[in-house]
Amino acid sequence: MKDAMMAGAIYVQTNEPDNAVIAYGRDASGMLERMGPYPTGGSGDAVPHLTSQGSVALSGDGRFLLVSNVASDDVSVFAVREDGLDLVRRTPTGPGPKSIAERDGLVYVLAAGKPRVAGFRLTDAELEPIPGAGSMLSAANADPAQVGFSPDGSLLVVTERGTDSIVSFPVMADGRLGEMRVVPSSGPTPYGFAFTPEGSTLVVTEAFRAEKGAAAASSYRVSMGEIVPVTRSLGNGRSEICWAVVGPDGRSVYTTNFADGAVSRYVVRQGASLTLGEVAAGLTEDGRPGLRDEDLTRDGRFLYAIDADAGRIVGWAVGTDGSLTPIGDWDGVPVTVAGLAAR
C-alpha cells in the first residue's frame, strides 16, 4: 500500500494512560495497513470497554480528527494527512469527555463525569469555546452515552442510559442551544444512535438488557425538532446491542452486539418504521464477546468495527443489497481500544 494511493483510513484510540491514535491506511479493496501510533498528549482511563459512541470523530470535511481523552478531561485535535496525523492542540472540555459531535465547524463534547454538553468552534489552530454554549443534562445520574447532530445541524441529541431518556436541544445560529426536550426511550438504556441521511428517522440501540438474546433497537420520527417513537424495541435475538451506523442509502442500519460477536442489520421503511433485515449480517466468532465501535466509510462500501477483546479491527464489504461480506481482520490494538472513525 505504501506504493499506491490510499483510498481512505481508519482511526481508533488506545484509551491508555499515554493515549494515542492508531491509524490504518485503507486501499480501494478495503485492505488496511497500520500507521502510527500518534500520541494525543492526553490520558485515557486504561479501562476496557469505554462506555460511549463517538469518542473518535472526523470533521465533516475530513480535515480534522477529534479524540476524547477521558482521564485528562480534554479533546485532542489532529490535522489529517494522507500519510498520517499531526497533533494540533488539546483543549479542556469538562470531566470525562466520552463522545464528540461536529458539523460545519461547530463541535459539541459530551462530558460524562458531570453530565453536560459544551460547545466549541473548530478552527485550523484549536477548539475555541463558545461563550454560553452548553447545558447540563436532564439529571445528575444521566449516565450519557452519545452526543450527535441531526444531518441539517438544527438539533443536538444525547442518549441518557441512567434516566432511559433521549434528550434534544435546538441549535441556534450562533451555536448555542435552545431549551432542552426530554423524550422517554422506547426501551431501557438507550445507547448509540444514528440518523438517516435526510434526518427524518433516528434509530437508537437499547443496551444491556438483563435477558440473554433480548437486544433491541427503536426508531423515531424527527420533524420540526420533535422526536416521536415509531417502532418500539424491535429485538434481534442477540445480546448487548450498543453501536449504530446508517448506510448512505438511508435504509440499512448496522448495529454491533457486544456480547456475542454479531453485526445485525435493520431496515428503515417508509414513515420511519423499522424491520429486522438480518440477525447476524456479519460475525467475528459467534457467541464470543468483544465487538464494539463501528463505522462505515464515507462511500458506504466498507464497514469496520473494533473486536476489542481480541485486540483487532474487523472489516466487511457492503453489498448493494446491504449484505456484509468479510474482507479481513487486523491485529495491533490493545484491549482498551475505543472509538472508530472511517473515511
Image (tube, grey):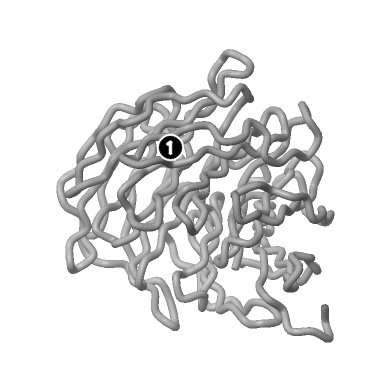
Among the 4 quarters of the image, the one containing residue 152: bottom left
Answer left or right for 180 relative to 100.
left
Regarding residue 17, the answer to whether it shows in the image is no
Tag 1: residue type? Answer: Val
Q: How many marks?
A: 1
- Answer left or right for 33 relative to 15: right
Classify residue 3 as left or right of residue 66. right
Residue 229: x %, y % from top left = 30, 31
Which residue: 56% across, 74% down? 78
Q: Quadrant of the N terminus?
A: bottom right
Residue designated by label 1: 204
Q: Whole-percent x and y of residue 245?
A: 52, 49
Nearest the camera: 29 or 185? 29
The structure residue drawn at horizontal position 73% and vertical position 70%, both measured from the top left corner, is 26
The vertical placement of 44 against 125, above or below, is: above
Closer to us: 69 or 238? 238
User: What is the x, y in percent for residue 221?
Assistant: 29, 40
* Residue name at image x 73 percent, y 73 percent: 28
Q: How far across and how far down the image is residue 11, in percent?
A: 65, 63
Residue at (62%, 19%) from the top-left corner? 213
Does the image show residue 58?
yes
Q: Is residue 77 left or right of residue 5?
A: left
The answer to whether 113 is drawn above or below residue 236 in the figure is below
Residue at the far top in the pictured view: 211
